[in-house]
Amino acid sequence: MSSPARTPGTPVIGVLALQGDVREHLVALAEADALARPVRRPEELAEIDGLVIPGGESTTMSKLAGVFGMLEPLRERIRAGLPVYGTCAGMIMLADKILDGREDQQTFGGVDMIVRRNAFGRQNESFEASVEVSGVEGGPVEGVFIRAPWVESVGGEVEVLARHDGHTVAVRQGNVLATSFHPELTGDHRVHALFVEMVRGA
Ligand SMILES: NC(=O)CC[C@H](N)C(=O)O
């Protein structure tokens, strides 16, 4: 289905707008040449070529995803190949398994990885660090880490794209990209551009 505003070759990318820093991602995606729009309801999943899951609070996001009936429909779309990019809490939502979550906390899954919530938080609540991300040209990106998770372990299909202090902080498995940090807060939209390229190639 194409919307009237859509020009050929411009992907429509949703930002899951249940909770979190939705607006910053809408801006970053628009600057990376996508048509960006907030997505809240299962029926809106039919209108997008890709989806960003923002940072925020994964326990709240999990709860709201249940309330809005998004858990199963989005799981299915991800399994069917929808390109998805999750930052921070979004990364947690894309993990097949999490550590230090709430007991009833659900994820969409999609990446064969174990993610530990608030992992850097024990050392450092929030910080910035230069991170070299495989596939992003032009030098390291400035990663903003806010009560950030890290990836504790990955399965054989998962590509590790970046590490910080020895911990995995960016991964890709097929159609799914995830970072522990928030590139949408820096004005440097190269990671979003990488995701837009993934969506174009899907
Ligand atoms: N900046 C963030 O997205 C923080 C993630 C948050 N600590 C969580 O567990 O969901």
Image: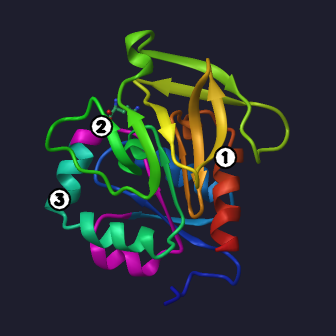
Q: Nearer the viewer, residue 174 or 74?
A: 174
Task: Report ligand 1 position as a quadrant.
Answer: top left
Q: Secondary structure at mark 1?
A: helix
Q: Marks 1/3: CA distance?
A: 29 Å
Residue, x 48% and y 75% (percent of image)?
Answer: 48
Q: Residues within 10 Å of mark 3 (few under 14, many from 20)?
A: few
Q: Residues within 10 Å of mark 2 (few under 14, many from 20)?
A: some
x, y percentage for residue 93?
36, 48
Q: Is residue 73 above or below residue 165?
A: below
Occupied quadrant, residue 120? top left
Query: Number of labelled discs?
Result: 3
**Looking at the picture, which amino acid does disc 1 mark?**
Val
Label 2, ligand 1: CB separation under 8 Å = yes
Left or right placement of residue 15 versus residue 135 in this view: left
Q: Secondary structure at mark 2?
A: loop
Q: Which mark is residue 191?
A: 1
Residue that label 2 marks: 57
Q: Which label's residue is closer to the chain start, 1 or 3?
A: 3
Residue that label 3 marks: 66
The residue range painted magenta reads: 39-59
Q: Residue furthest top?
A: 123
Q: Residue furthest right?
A: 138
